Image: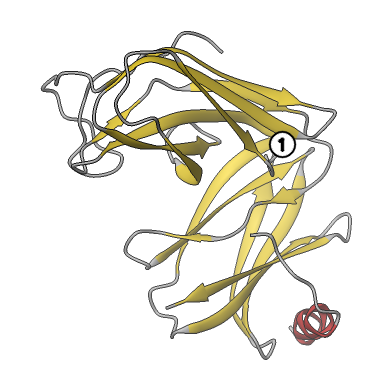
Amino acid sequence: MKNSSLLFLAFLMAGLSTAAAAHSPFPGKPLPERGAYRSRAARLPVKITVLTAAYNPAQQVVNLRWSTVLEKNNERFIVERSVDSLHFSSIGETRSAGNTETAQHYYFDDPKPIGGTLYYRLREVDADGKEYLSEVVNTSKPITQLEMTSVRLGEDHTTANLEIAAPGTVSASLILADVKGKVLKTFQLSLQRGTVFKSFYVGDLKAGVYFLQLNDHSGGKALLKKFSMD
């Protein structure tokens, strides 16, 4: 436990910073809230002709491209990513043309894709607040090392979510600590080759800044991410 605290303090003193296809027409299902479909169809405000995702190894980004031939009362597109096709999170957004019957072409690059199979979808948001989900497309990035994404809080701020990619079988631990390096929680992990979604409870934490450290027990590698509780 003492070594873990010292490792956190070493990271802090070093000033470690964190960083934070196929045809896919919109199914026309407005959402009352994120992640939940409604069965009743609605008139499509946007007509997507193509949506693709492709990993670019030269730039180490994922290139997302989509085109529309009709947009009505459209405000923006939110780009969402998942590693299991179930748990999606926003990675960025782009403004749309709004109202048009001419072809529009959109480009978005995922600058920090984690290794493994990656799933993407678009969340189209109307000016009146209605939301529509696109179909899901996927691509893959080779897993060459142990990776961990930035920590994202759930909508109720009681869970912290992240993804971990492992190049092989890895025995690891996740250590949660405060800004003073005090260890608050420890989670033991047995990882297999691939990418997994992880979620843990943080509803008992006070407002402030925290650090999550992933320790590889076999290779000695340690990854550190910072997140804040409001």
Where is residue 23 shown, x and y percent of the image? Answer: 46, 8
Up the image or down, 83 lies above or below 48; here it is below
Up the image or down, 53 lies above or below 146; here it is above
What is the residue that sits farthest to the left in this orientation?
A: 40
Q: Nearer the viewer, residue 213 or 82?
A: 82
On screen, residue 189 versus residue 70, left or right, reads right
In which quadrant is the C terminus drawn?
bottom left
Q: Quadrant of residue 157?
A: bottom left
Q: Quadrant of residue 133?
A: top left
Q: Quadrant of residue 48?
A: top left
Q: Nearer the viewer, residue 114 or 6?
A: 114
In which quadrant is the N terminus drawn?
bottom right
On screen, residue 188 versus residue 42, left or right, reads right
Give me the residue at 37% from left, 34% from top.
Answer: 123
Where is residue 167 shown, x and y percent of the image? Answer: 79, 38
Secondary structure beneath disc 1?
Answer: loop
Give me the residue at 81% from left, 27% from top.
Answer: 57
Where is residue 134 shown, x and y percent of the image? Answer: 37, 24
User: For the residue marked with disc 1, what is the amino acid?
Assistant: Gly
Count of numbered badges drawn on the protein? 1
Where is residue 3 shown, x and y percent of the image? Answer: 82, 82
Up the image or down, 116 lies above or below 221; here it is above
Give me the residue at 59% from left, 78% from top.
Answer: 210
Instruction: Read off the residue under disc 1.
Output: 115
User: Mark 1: few, some, or many residues within 10 Å (few <14, many ≥20)?
Assistant: many
What is the residue that sits farthest to the bottom in this orientation?
A: 180
